[in-house]
Amino acid sequence: MKYKESLLLKKILIYVLMIFFALLAVVPIYLMMVNATRSNAQINDGISLLPGTNTLYNWKNLTNRSFKISQGFGNSAFIAFFSTLLGVYFSALTAYGIHVYNFKGRNVLWGFILIVIMIPGTLSFIGFYQFMAAIKLTDSYIPLIIPSIAAAGTVLFLKQYMESILSRELIDAGRIDGANEFYIFNLIMLPIFTPAIAAQSIFSFVGSWNNFTLPFVLLSDQKKYTLPMLVQSLRGDIYRTEYGSIYLGVAVSLVPVLIFYAFMSRFIISGITMGSVKE
């Protein structure tokens, strides 16, 4: 009896904690959505849990000014898509090569990747900008996309995932059937890594979509501004007191992230139940 009561208390405690952390994640987003529908005066009055009726005015205030939302969406989507695609694919390729093949210097390479993870990215920021300026790649999307290939954290995650799920029997079977190494990786191994790749794709896409500092430093042409840069521009003189428009701009910028998460999360769920080898 005491055991059942203890188990029930643990379950209640777990549910309470889950609800608490869910509220911590959801409430700020909900308040942002509510403020996007309120007027500037209503926002200054304090927090409200009920939506307002000022959405249309806030939207017109955005679109009638210099906030080119479609242009920002296109620029951010272009950068986020290709940086995610290249970063996750080449990270998976690197993790696969380190895990599967025995070659001289493998441990040194793996140690170097771990060291890169421990070094804060801000330490190389000035040097990176100077290098991009020296080769005349500022005001370009190239330094925002190509460096994402060297994603040490993604390599670490995927390698650890491969160690727990990868079956070398599939690799040997593919080699016996005459498949080359890239064929084995692209058509046999990648589908097995779908849950890990989907998870890292979400992290990579969100990080690239919300990236503000690097585009702000590198890009000077307003036609190339990403959506976070355009949202930041709402803090200028014209929009200094238009908090409703600022909240609406931030809310709009979250829509693609939510869509991408909803699309990729189903691959995580479906991939978990997929087995690679029947013993």
Image (cartoon, grey):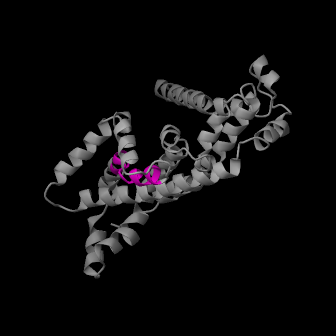
The x and y percentages for residue 165 are 34, 57
Observer-nearest residue: 251 or 172?
A: 251
Q: Tell me the residue at 25%/57% (across/down).
A: 98
Residue 254 lies left or right of residue 11; in this view the side is right
Q: Tell me the residue at 55%/44% (across/down).
A: 220
Does the magenta-highlighted stretch encompass residue 252?
Answer: no
- Give the quadrant of residue 47: top right
The x and y percentages for residue 211 are 52, 41
Observer-nearest residue: 2 or 43?
A: 43
The x and y percentages for residue 278 are 36, 67
Observer-nearest residue: 192 or 59?
A: 59
Residue ranking furthest to the top: 45
Q: What type of secondary structure mainly makes up the magenta span?
A: helix
Q: Which residues are magenta?
A: 142-155
Q: Tell me the residue at 23%/45% (across/down).
A: 112
Does the magenta-highlighted stretch encompass residue 150?
Answer: yes
Residue 62 visible here: yes
Residue 272 visible here: no
